[in-house]
Image (cartoon, rainbow, N blue to C red):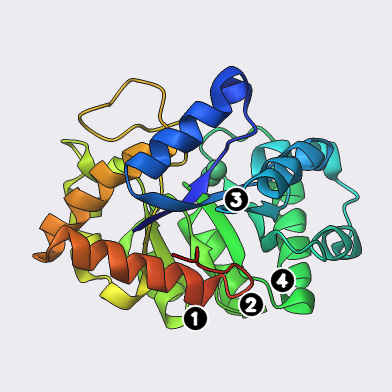
């Protein structure tokens, strides 16, 4: 069994064939998916997808790209939405200084708002960090949130180590299969097996051999195979371990009954 710990099933890319995508995931052994909130005005759609499928859970949050539209967000808004039984995490949140689609001070304020909501609910943070290693590490060090996940990890070794030190998990996306990702592979090799997750970040970042195509949860199997090879273990072992890690971190989600 595999878990896709981060995907965006509400995105319009999937609108016409969501059920087919869930079925293909199931056939590929992907028995659990976490679909991620990025805007509060889309949250009802995200939640409805989770409500309609036993194996899909969701998170609530505002992506750093969207922060500019939610400058006045209060922790209580997230806390209230997170009370729903299918909401198992807070995010995605964090800092993206690559695209800079929202002003940096607003991104940072919202990051801290999500941290406050994580602390209050006890639900793990889902952190997006891009070209902001020092800033993300600094805020985590200052705020000391409960353990969460660094999603689609593509940062440097220092941030990986700082996150692991705080009890965080590292989620590996299809990036790890890309030819030029030697530095990322070196970091993943050193992440303890009991702190690893795998994800697609679908519809983005399809792993080799699907690179360039629209990504979907079934393809997390290709990423898992690449990570298993890096770790020198059987795919089945990697799949079982990352699934157990997921349910340990996202304790509000329950594993499918078989
Ligand atoms: Zn992200
Ligand atoms: Zn995402």
Q: Quadrant of the N terminus?
A: bottom left
Sequence-wise, which precedes: disc 2 or disc 3? 3
User: Do labels 2 and 4 touch, CB within 8 Å?
Assistant: yes
Which residue is found at the position 19% from the left and 50% from the top?
225
Q: Quadrant of the C terminus?
A: bottom left
Lateral position of residue 203 relative to residue 179, left or right: right
Lateral position of residue 177 relative to residue 163, left or right: left
User: Do labels 2 and 1 touch, CB within 8 Å?
Assistant: yes
The residue labelled by disc 3 is: 95
Which residue is found at the position 22% from the left and 32% from the top?
208
The residue labelled by disc 1 is: 166
User: Do labels 2 and 3 touch, CB within 8 Å?
Assistant: no
The residue labelled by disc 4 is: 118
The residue labelled by disc 2 is: 145
Element class at badge 2: loop
| Label 4 crowd (10 A; few <14 / some 14-19 / many >=20) | many
Q: Which mark is residue 56?
A: none
């Amino acid at each position: 069994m595999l878990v896709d710990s981060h995907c965006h099933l509400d995105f319009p890319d999937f609108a016409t064939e969501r059920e087919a995508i869930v079925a293909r995931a199931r056939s590929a052994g992907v028995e659990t998916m976490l679909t991620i909130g990025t805007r509060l005005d889309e949250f009802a759609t995200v939640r409805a997808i989770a409500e309609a499928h036993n194996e899909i859970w969701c998170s609530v949050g505002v992506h750093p790209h969207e922060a500019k539209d939610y400058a006045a967000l209060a922790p209580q808004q997230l806390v209230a939405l997170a009370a729903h039984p299918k909401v198992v995490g807070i995010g995605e949140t964090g800092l993206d200084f690559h695209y800079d689609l929202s002003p940096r001070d607003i991104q940072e304020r919202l990051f801290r708002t999500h941290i406050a909501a994580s602390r209050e609910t006890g639900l793990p943070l889902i952190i997006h960090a891009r070209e902001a290693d020092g800033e993300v590490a600094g805020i985590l060090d200052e705020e000391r949130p409960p353990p969460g996940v660094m999603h689609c990890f593509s940062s440097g070794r220092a941030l990986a180590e700082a996150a692991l030190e705080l009890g965080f998990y590292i989620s590996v996306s299809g990036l790890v299969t890309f030819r030029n990702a030697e530095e990322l592979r070196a970091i993943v090799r050193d992440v303890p097996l009991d702190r690893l997750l795998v994800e697609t970040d679908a519809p983005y970042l399809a792993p080799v051999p699907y690179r360039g195509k629209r990504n979907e949860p079934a393809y997390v199997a290709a990423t898992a195979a690449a990570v298993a090879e890096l770790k020198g273990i059987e795919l089945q072992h990697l799949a079982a371990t990352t699934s157990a890690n997921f349910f340990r971190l996202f304790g509000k989600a329950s594993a499918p009954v078989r």
